[in-house]
Amino acid sequence: MYRRFVSCYESWLEGQKSDLADLLRTSGTPGASQMQLRLIIDQCLRNYASYMEQRRSLAREDGPAYFCPSWCTSFENSVLWMGGCRPSLTIQLLYSLTGYEMEAHLNEYLQGLRNSTNVGLMALSARQLQQVNDLHQRTLRAEDRLTSRQATLHEGVADKPLLPIVKERQWTDAASTSSASVAVAAFSSASSLQNFDDGHCGFAVGGNGDAAAALQTYADGLSKLVEEADALRMSTARALVTEILNPSQAVEVLIAAKQLHLSVHTWGLERDRQHGRE
């Protein structure tokens, strides 16, 4: 099963490279029509939706795997949220690109040599800016709800499932050992937490049916979070590039988003090599 997780991610990376090449080629074509731009945008969204469907299937088999994926670099893992990027990141990227474009051409705007009403992302209208802000606020609220649910899951698994494991093994005296060290000891036991795979983050518990059931419920809860987070990522991206931005603006954002993703992956690989984690 693990190989299928890796293959899914590697195929997605190759798809990102292919979509980026198509986006750059289309955007660089003199006189590219709005229809041509819409076609490449639709292609990117279809590929994204296909990837999300594969992830949904895999997450239902092992949701915890997406919270510490060994197929990603340590740098990529450090910025993950619910097994992927934050949905609001795409909107923040749009804000950054707009500000960068203004800064890069500030003197031309001040001298009247460039018209901000018809150039790239600076062409965002007041209505578009309001729509982007509304989408940003809705997305942030949805992210907060999912983060709160994850925290509740964490609190639950640290309470009910681990306690009977610790008691069963009699590793520690409650009067002399802190609850923190108890939790560490519980997760460290190879006999009570069988089949713990550090690279996969999946686990099975033997010797305690109640604990095994509780941990399975926890894993199922994580699977559901990944599904809902992916749905939020998809809906946010779709709303931004098809409902708010015009085709030219959407292509600019998609190019930047894919370049950022691929760059983070490349930086992560180089950093892992530097730290002997090849």
Image: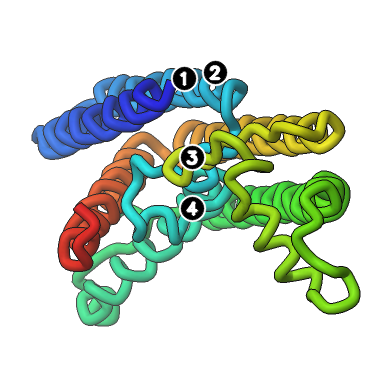
Locate residue 233, reporting x and y percent. 55, 39
Looking at the rendering, which quadrant does residue 193 occupy? Answer: top right
Residue 113 visible somewhere in the drawing = yes
Tell me whether the residue at label 4 lies in contact with that at label 3, contact meaning CB atoms closer than 8 angstroms.
no
Mark 2 or 4, nearer chain start:
2
From this viewpoint, which residue is outermost toward the front? Answer: 170
Residue at the disc numbered 3:
197
Q: Secondary structure at mark 4?
A: loop
The quarter of the picture where the N terminus appears is: top left
Q: Which residue is mark 2?
A: 57
Q: Which residue is mark 4?
A: 80
Q: Cβ–Cβ below 8 Å for labels 1 and 3?
A: no
Q: Identify the amino acid type marked 3.
A: Asp
Compare marks 2 and 3 and give the one earlier in the sequence.
2
In this view, the residue in front, 12 or 49, is: 12
> What secondary structure is marked by label 3?
loop
> Looking at the picture, does residue 48 appear above or below residue 273?
above
Q: CA distance from mark 4 to mark 3?
A: 20 Å
Pinpoint residue 255: horizontal percent, then vertical percent.
Answer: 27, 44
Question: In the rendered view, does 106 fall on the left or right side of 242?
Answer: left
Position of residue 199 measured from the top left corner of the image (x, y, whole percent): 42, 43
- Within 10 Å of disc 1 (Cα), the crowding (few <14, some 14-19, many 20+) is some
Residue receiving disc 1? 54
Secondary structure type for disc 1: helix
Image vertical order of residue 44 relative to residue 163, above or below: above
